Image: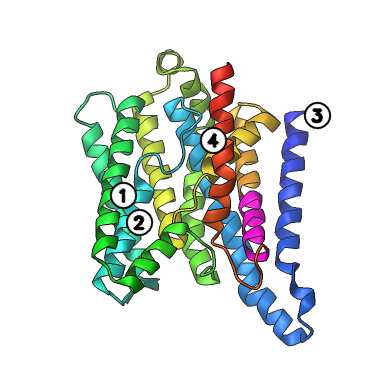
Amino acid sequence: MTSLHKLIFITLSSFVVAFAAPWIGLGDIKNEIIQQQILLDIRLPRVLFAFVAGAGLSLCGMVFQAMFHNPLATPFTLGVASGASFGAACTVFLGLNVTLLGFDVITIGAFIGALVAITFVFFISQLQRGFSSETLLLTGVATSFFFSSLILFIQYLSDMTDSFMIMRWLMGGLSSASYHSLLQLIPIVTISTAIILWLSRELNLLMAGDDIALSRGVSVKQVRYLLFFSTSLCVGGIVALCGPIGFIGMMVPHICRLLIGTDHRWLTPATLMFGGGFLILCDGIARLLIAPAEIPVGVITTLLGGPFFLWLLIKRRQR
């Protein structure tokens, strides 16, 4: 099969998953009016939101793995998720309850926290010339640990109710997905996707190394700037709306590389489609595993990501 045929197969598979997911379990409801309301008002926006969020996280993971030359890199490598989680934890701890421009206070706090983390990583990495991938990676890891420790501190000071709300948000979930949140998310992911598609050739050259990219006329520093800000803001927006859903950005790019190869001109659309369908599938498992109760989808992705992470480590050691 050619790369085009594989991409078509991945796209069709994702569409089948997206089409089937809203209907699962509806047969148990006999009232057609209630069935229609659940389908249109709950299931459909949730599936669409899962597709957009999964596609965005997967694409950002693919970009980070190319930028850092590290197959274990994830969208949360630069500490953006930890910063967003800290912002959300602060709003819960302070008991804030306001809405601004249609955004609830937790979403606003999480996005502000993500912006603080992005700014912090950027200025710290500027202390060394070149804005290198090694400096970004180390700064991101340190930032992630710093904000994670602050979250633990806030949880320790919180009462039982606030501590539970913080923990529940940190698991990541799609239960609050709606058409309103979908419309908030689509522009963020669309802009980031357009930038990544535009720089697909540059990503191929960055994978080969900065020296080779420079010799082929790529402005490495400017490209890294653009990718850093676009992907970080995309991750910050997704995490602000649905919490940190881990390991999607690490697993999906690797699976797509096995299916379609390493050329980002094909890998980018394949990761986009596969990532969306994969998160829909994980969310379906989360809804049905202990029905009528629901498991946060972040728990499912982490359960899948742990063994996958170990498999990558073993595979790299064998090589």
Which residues make up the magenta segment?
Answer: 276-288
Identified by mark 4, the residue type is Phe
Query: Neighbour class for label 4 at 10 Å: few (<14), some, many (≥20)?
Result: some
Is residue 55 visible in the rendered image? The answer is: no
Foreground: disc 3 or disc 2: 2
Q: Is 294 in front, or is 78?
A: 294
The tag earlier along the polypeptide, 4 or 3, is 3
Q: Earlier in the sequence, mark 4 or mark 1?
A: 1
Of the residues tagged 4 and 3, which is closer to the observer?
4
Please tell me whether residue 49 belongs to the stretch shown in magenta. no
Earlier in the chain: of badge 1 and badge 3, it is: 3
Q: Which mark is residue 311?
A: none
- Find disc 4 in the rendering and name its residue: 309
Q: Are marks 4 and 3 in contact (CB under 8 Å)?
A: no
In percent of width and height, residue 270 lies at 65, 39
State which tag comes first along the sequence, 1 or 2. 2
Whether 285 is among the magenta residues is: yes
* Circle 3 residue: 1
Q: Mark 2 — residue?
A: 85
Could you tell me residue 291's position as x and y percent?
66, 70
Q: Quadrant of the N terminus?
A: top right
Who's the residue at 52% across and 42% down the image? 249
| Location of mark 1 (residue) | 148
Q: Is residue 298 left or right of residue 138?
A: right
